Amino acid sequence: MSRNKINKYKKPQQAKAKNGKVHVVNFSSYTKPEVKEVYSRDWIEYGEDNNYFQYLIDRYNGSPTNNAAINGIADMIYGKGLDAIDEEGNKAQHDEMHELFSKKCLKSVCYDYKMMGNAAFQVIYSKDRSRIAQVEHIPIQTLRAEKADVNGNIKAYYYSNDWSKVSSSKKNVKRISAFGFSNDNIEIVYIKPYKAGFFYYSPVDYQGGLQYAELEEEIANYHINNIQNGLAPSMLINFNNGVPSEEERGLIEQRIYDKFSGSSNAGRFILAFNDSKELSASIEPVQLSDAHQQYQFLSDESMKKVMVSHRIVSPMLVGIKDSSGLGNNAEELQTASVLMDNTVVRPLQVTILDEIEEILKFNGIELDIYFKTLQPLEFTDLTNAISEAEIEKETGVKKDSEAGSESSDDEEISEEVDKNLKE
């Protein structure tokens, strides 16, 4: 890809106030991140302030629905951990794989990948660089891509613990080569899915739900501040001492907006000093009819839209209770679980597994790897599983070939697998 064709988001135009004596103050429009190349810097910025990953973290911390969805799907991606089908014939390779990739490392990468849309491994080579000695997770928010070369290759990433404090200089910024582009002892394996129109960074798969995650935050923030400040209603402010010039009206409007607008300013009071009662500013409460119903609608709508953006088939799969009840929809829940596992979780796993296989290949490790599923055995879809290897991938259950016989628990599992196959 040409380095000149860098994807950029455009900001939506702000609504302009109309000329007149009555002004309506509009909230700021939601702005998507910019991926931009700055001439004086060697890295590509992500977001208007080069801190878009922090925006995603804030949406995760502030929205309960977004938080539950990310946690639930990240857990599903990791499942019960990394495993391989060829364990019996390649025990040494299997053991080396688990030495390279710790549970903590893999869990963190799965979490980053779901939450940030990108993730990264830090590979550490042996002294003679003949093999990879260690693999560690590196927080994705600490990395920025280097400008691509003329062939479209990203040869390095820049590391900083806090990009909000980084200026145009390289102070407190460290360059780390990308995997396969250097002879350094440490390299970065950057994981990102293909998205049309994107090159340096990939947007999150729930990009369309971020506005609603932020709305959910603001609703909660508004209610908290309003309760703490006495449940004061919104106000209509009239100035009775003549009509000022357009410039003065704009200045007054901006000062009132800065001081009283926003969910964090709900319930603030206004203190006014006047020469006389006739010239005093009048403040009239603006009561919102059926306010509780409107806020309930916004709350419900935000939750639904966030779940749609995450492609959650049933909210109960990520720990969100719906009105139908688990007992009455057991069969529907099973169908939803299988559907989500195949259409949402597996594709996310594949991208991570592809990069893990590249790392293992450097050490000469050839294994058929997979993440052991969290799916209950009775929910497992074995329709297309023909061989024992495919059954193992679907269920995470291994055949006990060494002992020649199975334990009572394994017998129950095998019977359940056979039953599912027959069905």
Image (cartoon, rainbow, N blue to C red):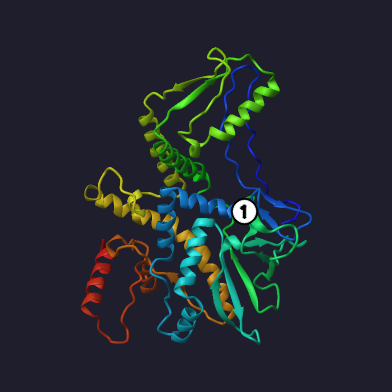
Please state the horizontal and vertical placement of residue 122, each as a whole percent of the image: 59, 72
Which residue is tagged 1?
A: 51
Quarter assignment of residue 255: top right
Q: Is residue 25 above or below residue 93?
A: above
* Disc 1 secondary structure class: loop
Please tell me which residue lies in front, 50 or 388.
Answer: 50
Q: Name the residue located 62 percent from the left edge and 30 percent from the top edge.
A: 254
Q: Name the residue located 26 percent from the left edge and 72 percent from the top edge.
A: 414
Q: Is residue 350 above or below residue 282?
A: below
Q: Is residue 100 left or right of residue 177?
A: left
Q: Is residue 273 above or below residue 410?
A: above
* Count of numbered badges drawn on the protein: 1
**Three-letter code, disc 1:** Asn
**Is residue 26 visible to us here?**
yes
Question: Which quadrant is the N terminus positioned in?
Answer: bottom right
Question: Which quadrant is the C terminus positioned in?
Answer: bottom left
Please state the horizontal and vertical placement of residue 30, each as a whole percent of the image: 57, 39
Q: Is residue 334 left or right of residue 37?
A: left
Please state the horizontal and vertical placement of residue 170, each as a whole percent of the image: 74, 64
Please tell me which residue lies in front, 128 or 401.
Answer: 128
Please tell me which residue lies in front, 257 or 127.
Answer: 257
Outermost residue toward the top in this view: 278
Quarter assignment of residue 19: top right
